Amino acid sequence: MNRCPLVAGNWKMNGLIVSLAEIAAMRTVYDVGLKARVELVVCPPATLIGLALDIATQGGLGLGGQDCHAAASGAHTGDISAEMLKDAGASYVIVGHSERRTDHGETSAIVRVKAKAALRAGLTPIICVGETRAQREAGEALSVVGRQIEESVPAEAPETIVVAYEPVWAIGTGLTPTPEDVAQMHAFARERIEAQLGGGKSESVRILYGGSVKPGNAGELMSVANVDGALVGGASLTAKDVMAIATAYR
Ligand code: 13P
């Protein structure tokens, strides 16, 4: 199965207009050869999507949102719909990031509805799952992630969806699971995605690894079986680091 790897940068609550220069700088490294090997997407704060559109498009980069509301529009002060992200120029949206699950109490049931909203609007959802440190230490990592996939991935979703495995304890800590643990989790995740989608669709679903992906460990992590790219936080804020990560695919 030929899954084109995806490197997606999650800027989280970082980025001002001046940061658009980083997206412009990414374009110079993202040449024809690299484009053929890896898809590159930046998920800046929603305030920057419209402003980044021309810069990104000219360089063959995609844009994504970091969250969306389930509804298309309405009385939901402060929220942004998938349709609005699409309208602003996004083609992806992250849903169910652990920071949303923790900071905003988002359950997997809510994440599933958001993933459906993304699909309704013509966006590709990047559905995040991952266990906490306590859950891993208790030997529950596989069961927790299995349940999150079962409850967060819509059964009727197409094989174009993206799933990101982000162990909560690896986010922003400099810690990463061993390649063996990543291999075990990603193989397991693909099985659970197949149980959801059926029909062999899981073979086409890209499963990203996220959590302290850096230029120094990207080569090792990205070469693990069933790892189809990375969801990068801190290192995606500079063109230098994110392009060093993407270059692992050259
Ligand atoms: P870091 O790469 O900063 O660990 O963040 C990972 C992440 O949460 C991406 O969504």
Image (tube, rainbow, N blue to C red):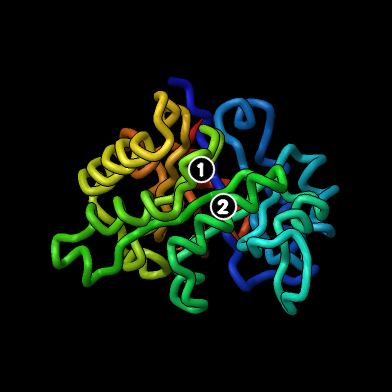
- Mark 2–mark 1 Cα distance, whole angstroms, equals 10 Å
The image shows residue 66 at horizontal and vertical percentages of 61, 61
Q: Quadrant of residue 144?
A: bottom left
Reply above or below: 80 against 2.
below
Q: Secondary structure at mark 2?
A: helix
Give the residue pinned by disc 1.
162
From the image, which quarter does the N terminus lie in? top left
Of the image marks 2 and 1, the number of the one nearer the N terminus: 2
Q: Residue at x 20, y 63 (%)?
A: 136
The image shows residue 175 at horizontal and vertical percentages of 31, 63
Q: Residue at x 30, y 58 (%)?
A: 176
Horizontal relation, residue 237 to residue 228: left or right: right
Viewer-side label of 2, 1: 2
Horizontal relation, residue 66 to residue 212: left or right: right
Give the residue pinned by disc 2.
115
Q: Residues within 10 Å of mark 2 (few under 14, many from 20)?
A: many
Q: Residue at x 68, y 27 (%)?
A: 32
Amino acid on which disc 2 is placed: Ala
Q: Secondary structure at mark 1?
A: strand
Q: Quadrant of residue 16?
A: bottom right
